[in-house]
Amino acid sequence: MIYKKRSEPLSLLGLESLVNRLDRNNIHFKSIEEDLRKRKAGYGGELNFDKHINEFRPTYPYGILHDVCLMHNGIYFQMDSILIMPDCIVIFEIKNLGGKLTVKANPIQFIQDNNGVRKVIQSPIIELERKKIFMDRWLKERGVTIPIIGMVGLAFTNELFIEEETGTEIAFTHELPIKLYNRSIEKEVLVRHQISKIANEIKNSHLEYNPFPLSKSMEIVPKEIMPGVICPGCNYRGMKWIRQRWHCTKCLYNAKDCHHPLLDDWFYLIDNKITNRQFRAFSHIEDRSIAKRLLKKSELVMMGQRSSSFYTK
């Protein structure tokens, strides 16, 4: 049973907004665009894993949770996916890596070769070992003692060479359901209601990471973030509010709610609250009363009074 589904990472939404509102000549643009590309690839790999793991329907009780972040003693640890079985808990680390991969042990190394360009990447096995330690401590705090194992899932069908055994299962995501089916239950530690209890406690303890506003965490100056309502039809930035609708002067698209993504961009990138004046400057609306009406209809919460009022989510 799936207790927690995967949702699109907030950081991915924020980076997409930032790329749309940052000048391509900005010194940060290329690195942000590359970060966005990597995160999209990572998320795509995780969705690929979800599709395949959905085929795993054993006869014994089990629980699956995707994209879980927990905390132990003030330290956060994020897991791509967790499988709770009667005899153990499996933590999955999913990677979407192109090119040829070579895995070495002593020390553990993952070497990626893309068209002759070789680089050592951060080992997912080491990442798993860290998460296993904190997961074990988190569970024991709740009176649960159970073996924890790690599996590395490769979403991209790479050319893979494992030169030395590392003790951690490394497989392509389409292979994982079969490997799990072929695995025999060693010793039943958890029964159905215990699996359900642990899964629900993990779900309820999940901490959603909020990276916003990105301008602060990424040291982007807010004035570098370009204002203007972006047209959903042609991506032109600079729609005009005319006769109670937003109009694009480039493709002639028009609609009433085009300022909603603009407000999302503001909260993603600049601040966790917005004033009428700030909204007018960011959307290029001149009329204060029109701005007030749009803000009120945007499902935001108004706080404060008169000149000190502001809106937040």
Image (tube, rainbow, N blue to C red):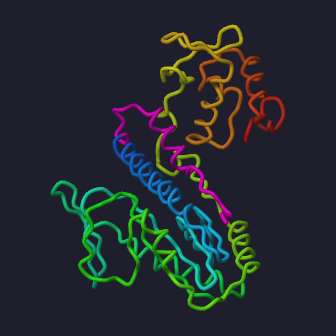
Task: Give me the residue at 84% from left, 34% from top.
Answer: 305
Q: Whole-percent x and y of residue 2? A: 65, 63
Q: Residue furthest front?
A: 59
Q: Quadrant of the C terminus?
A: top right
Nearer the observer, 72 or 1: 1
Nearer the observer, 278 or 239: 239
Q: Whole-percent x and y of residue 111? A: 25, 68
Q: Quadrant of the N terminus?
A: bottom right
Q: In which quadrant of the rendered view does residue 311 lie?
A: top right
Disc tally is 0
272 left or right of 302?
left
Q: Whole-percent x and y of residue 285? A: 64, 17
Specify whether residue 47 is painted magenta: no
Q: Is residue 212 above or below residue 267?
A: below
Q: In which quadrant of the rendered view does residue 72 lie?
A: bottom right
161 left or right of 188?
left
Q: Whole-percent x and y of residue 204? A: 73, 66
Residues shaded magenta: 1-29
